[in-house]
Image (cartoon, rainbow, N blue to C red):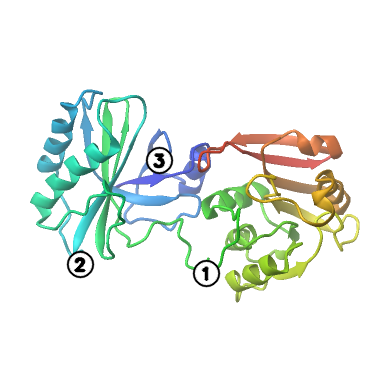
Amino acid sequence: MLLLARTIRGIESLVCQEIGGGVRRVRHREVWFDAAAPPRLRLADDVLALVAVARGVHPGRTALRRLARAVLEAPLPGAGRWTGLDVSASFLGRRSYTRYDIEDTVGEALARRLRLPYHSRRAGTAPPPGTMAWRVTIEGEEAAIAMRPAERPLHRRPYKVGSVPGTLHPPLAAAMARLAGPCGLVLDPCCGAGTTLVEAHAVAPGARYLGTDASSEAVRIAARNAAGRGITWAVADGGRLPLADGSVDRVLVNPPWDRQVRGLGVLAGDPGLLWREVDRVLTGAGRVVALLHEPALPEKYGLRVTREIPVSLFGRHPVITVASRG
């Protein structure tokens, strides 16, 4: 079975590492790979079964006929338990047709083949529960047509029952955890809803985890999301951490960007205090993985940046920054 993993832009190579063997192709936000069944990847937004590949999908409107023909000629899975179908499409570059034209073309062809009602997204309405989800992605003149075997995408984690403004996207948190290599005591000094540490716990359940936040409401939500995992949570100011010097092995942090979320406590007056505290509590071999808009920021406070991975996230372009002491 050829599968297609959808990813955050920028972490395709990390997803390849998580998949291991069997990678066949890497495209924009996609990794194609062989597997007997869809794996439970944590860094991927979603995993779909690749059903058809249409070539010659040029920017002109007549290319829509090529998409319809690819669906009509492809070996399709059975309708099974599904009560309907929906299609989501995306493409790179300028074209004389819209994503809704692509979705309706493919959706109507699938509906004829599978004898299921097609639920269009053109009017902005979400498809009802129980629909078979299809995805069309076009890069250059090549279109991938794929179906999600599961009922929900991978990025919708069952544990995330509560949220806060600026909460981190789970696959991105998982990528940060993979880069950190959780061990010893792992700290998130701006824990928010707890996503980063829950994802790190999935990578290394044997490490010790501490999440702090200046917001008591955020700490309450984090504790609820992480129930049963043995993670410790506390209300604390990120600029005055209640920890001894050199006591933390890894720091995972998505600090306030002063955009959707503003700093609280002493960080509201001086965001740099966070980095002074991180430098203070890290062990000599400690490592920091942070999501930043200013990737060089840790170097202003004594930390050495060792890796930068630009990503694209909901229209923003932060950088996963890996840093260490000295």
Closer to the chain start, of discs 2 and 3, is 3
Tell me the residue that label 1 is attached to. Answer: 161
Question: Disc 3 to disc 1, how far (Cα)?
Answer: 29 Å
Residue 167, can we see it? yes
Closer to the chain start, of discs 3 and 1, is 3
Looking at the rendered structure, which numbered label has been put on residue 31? 3
Comparing marks 2 and 3, which lies closer to the viewer? 2
Looking at the rendered structure, which numbered label has been put on residue 54? none
Residue type, label 3? Val
Tell me the residue that label 2 is attached to. Answer: 81
Indicate the quadrant where residue 241 lies. Answer: bottom right
Identify the residue at the far right of this view: 245
Indicate the quadrant where residue 97 lies. Answer: top left
Q: How many marks?
A: 3
Q: Residues within 10 Å of mark 1 (few under 14, many from 20)?
A: few
Residue type, label 2? Arg
The answer to whether marks 2 and 3 mark residues whose Cβ atoms lie closer than 8 Å is: no
